[in-house]
Amino acid sequence: LKIFPTALATFAAVIPLTAGMDAMRQILFKAEGFWPLEIEVSLLAGLSLFFLFLAHRFLNYLERLSKEEGRLTVKWQ
C-alpha cells in the first residue's frame, strides 16, 4: 500500500481483505503495516458489525417482500 498515493492507499486499506492481510503480515512477519495493528483490528471489527447490520436489514427486506408478493423467485418474461 505504501507505493500508492495517500488517497488511494487509504481507500484500499479500508477493504476488509487488504486490512486483514496487512494485519496478518504484521503479526506473522513483524513487518511494518499501513496502520498500527490495533487500528486495523478495530477497523475489521467495525466492518464486521457494519456488514452484519447490512445483511440483517437486507434479509428482513427480502423476507418482507416475499411475504407481500407470495413468491421467492423472479418471473422472467
Image: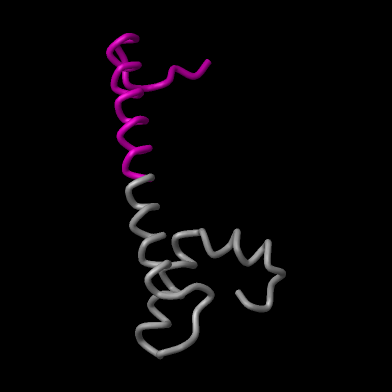
Q: Is residue 64 magenta?
A: yes
In the rendered image, residue 75 lying in the magenta stretch gets the answer: yes
Residue 2: x, y in percent? 63, 77
Q: Quadrant of residue 52 in the image?
A: top left
Check the image and report above or below for 58 versus 64: below
Which segment is the magenta one?
A: 51-77
Depth order, front residue of 39/73: 39
The vertical placement of 69 against 4, above or below, is above
For the residue pair 75 and 35, the one nearer the viewer reads as: 35
> What secondary structure predominates along the stretch shown in magenta?
helix
Q: Position of residue 41 (x, y in %)?
A: 36, 66
Q: How many marks?
A: 0
State left or right for residue 36 relative to residue 34: left
Residue 62 is situated, as x and y percent measured from the top left of the image, at 34, 24
Q: Nearer the viewer, residue 17 or 42?
A: 42
Q: Is residue 70 above or below residue 37?
A: above
**Colour basis:** one colour
In the picture provided, is 36 more to the left or to the right than 2?
left
**Residue at figure coordinates x 34%, y 30% from the top left:** 57
Q: Is residue 9 above or below residue 61?
A: below
Please identify the residue farthest to the right as the structure is shown. 5
Residue 40: quarter of image? bottom left
Q: Position of residue 5 (x, y in %)?
A: 72, 69
Q: Which image quadrant: the N terminus?
A: bottom right
Q: Residue at x 37, y 71 (%)?
A: 38
Looking at the image, which residue is at 54% across and 64% down? 13
